[in-house]
Amino acid sequence: MRSLEKKGKSVDEAIKLALEELGVGLDDVVIEVLEEPSRGILGIIGNKPAVVKVDVKNRPEKTAREKLKAILDGMKINYEIDRVEAQDGVVRINITGKDMGLLIGRKGETLNAVQFILGLMVNRDLEERVRVVLDVEDYRLRKEESLKSLAVNLSERVKRTRRSVVMRPMGPHERRVVHTALQGDPDIVTFSQGEEPNRKVVISLKK
């Protein structure tokens, strides 16, 4: 974190001066009061100013936006960062624009590669690791909803037939979607089997 110590006639003044110098808002920092102001003899001799230490937080959504902008500018594509959301250790970013087909690539391969690189860049600057999910015009969101629906339908088939179902090979993110979608079902258990890139999710009845 960027850090700055600042003096002022009062704690509030010291904080205000630090924020102005750092160019950030109150919500972006952690403040520690190092010294309270004190009045000297006759209120003149020996006066001591307030001293504060101000640390700028590493906000994952802000870091992710800046790093992604650098990547996409380098790719020279037409884009707009539609939204950036951070919750429960996950930063989700949605992008729109004219060149989104190029960014998605064949079966989402280009998008996955950019997401992987972005995740490495973001976590390099953060104290606590986050998972970065990069989406294009809600492409992943629509795909996730479709996958959740498929997982629920297959779990119902497993209950009817009492036979396990092995899904197609999927990447880590898609497998996580399936596991999460079915984790609340008391009759169903899911697990992954096989080696990458052919690792698959198995949906079975709980024994």
Image (cartoon, helix red, strand yellow):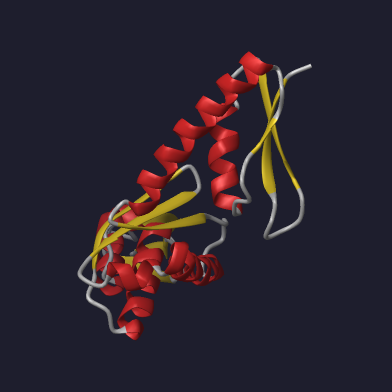
Report the side of 159 relative to 69 (left or right).
right
Residue 201 drawn above or below residue 34 = above
> In the rendered image, is residue 188 in sight?
yes
Question: Who is closer to the viewer here, 28 or 111?
Answer: 111
Q: Position of residue 5 (x, y in %)?
A: 41, 70
Q: Is residue 37 something one can see in this rendering?
A: no
Which quarter of the picture shows residue 189? top right
State the residue in front, 88 or 145: 145
State left or right for residue 71 relative to residue 204: left
Find the residue positioned furthest to the front: 161
Q: Residue furthest right?
A: 207
Figure quadrant of the C terminus: top right
Residue at 30% across, 63% down: 14
Residue 154 position in % (x across, y down): 56, 28
Q: Quick one: 177 or 168, which is closer to the camera?
A: 168
Residue at the image position 31 percent from the left and 52 percent from the top: 27
How many numbered tags mark residues here? 0
Q: Residue at x 71, y 28 (%)?
A: 164
Q: Place residue 166 in its image quadrant.
A: top right
Residue 127: x percent and y percent? 56, 61
Can you say whether 165 is above or below 5 in the image? above
Q: Residue at the location (63% across, 51% down)?
A: 169
Image coordinates for residue 73, horizontal then vertical, percent: 30, 81
